[in-house]
Image (tube, rainbow, N blue to C red):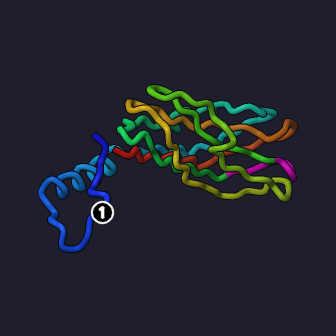
Amino acid sequence: MPFSLPANFNPGDSYTNTHANNVAAAINAIVNNMASAYVAASEGVTNTTTYTDLTTTTDQVTVTIGQSGAAIVFISSQTTINQAGGIGLMAFAISGANTQAATDTYAIGYQAYTTGASNFSGSPFVVPGLSPGSTTFKLKYRNFASGYTSTFTNRRIAVIPFP
């Protein structure tokens, strides 16, 4: 059963043990079911314009999606581009109880202003419409165009599924 409180909770209304237990259960579910992964290794993609894995594939987490069907996914990376104007993108794919290919809709990117330029970026993404169940979120990487290398360092992914 999804977490809920009365729609119109007003001052002076009775706050019962059921309400308190619902709040505690929701907070515990959020705190205890979040997961994160970190990969420090500097690895890159060359001439790859479709999302792919890097050598170290531990940049993934598995969580249990609740009845709400929603999760927040946080991704971040330091991205270095070996050519001015090159763009490196990092996104995530979803598998398990839910399936979704990596897409630019859920991506972070960096365009180099000069050869060898580097930037650290990250973003949270709300992912609604998921089915309840065990779901894996996996980072994927690509270049916007061919002809250069994008290198990703200090990659992070964290997922908070809602009850």
> Is residue 67 located in the magenta-colored stretch of the structure?
no
Placement of the N terminus among the 4 image quadrants = top left
Q: Is residue 83 left or right of residue 78?
A: right
Under mark 1, the amino acid is Asn
Outermost residue toward the left in this view: 17
On the image, the x and y values in percent for residue 125 come to: 55, 50
**On screen, residue 128 above or below 77:** above
Name the element at disc 1.
loop
For image coordinates 65% across by 58% down, the residue present is 120
For image coordinates 86% across by 51% down, the residue present is 85
Quick one: 76 or 131, which is closer to the camera?
131
Outermost residue toward the bottom in this view: 11
- Which residue is the site of mark 1? 8
Q: Which residues are magenta?
A: 79-86
On the image, the x and y values in percent for residue 118 come to: 73, 56
Quick one: 140 or 82, which is closer to the camera?
140
On the image, the x and y values in percent for residue 4 come to: 29, 51
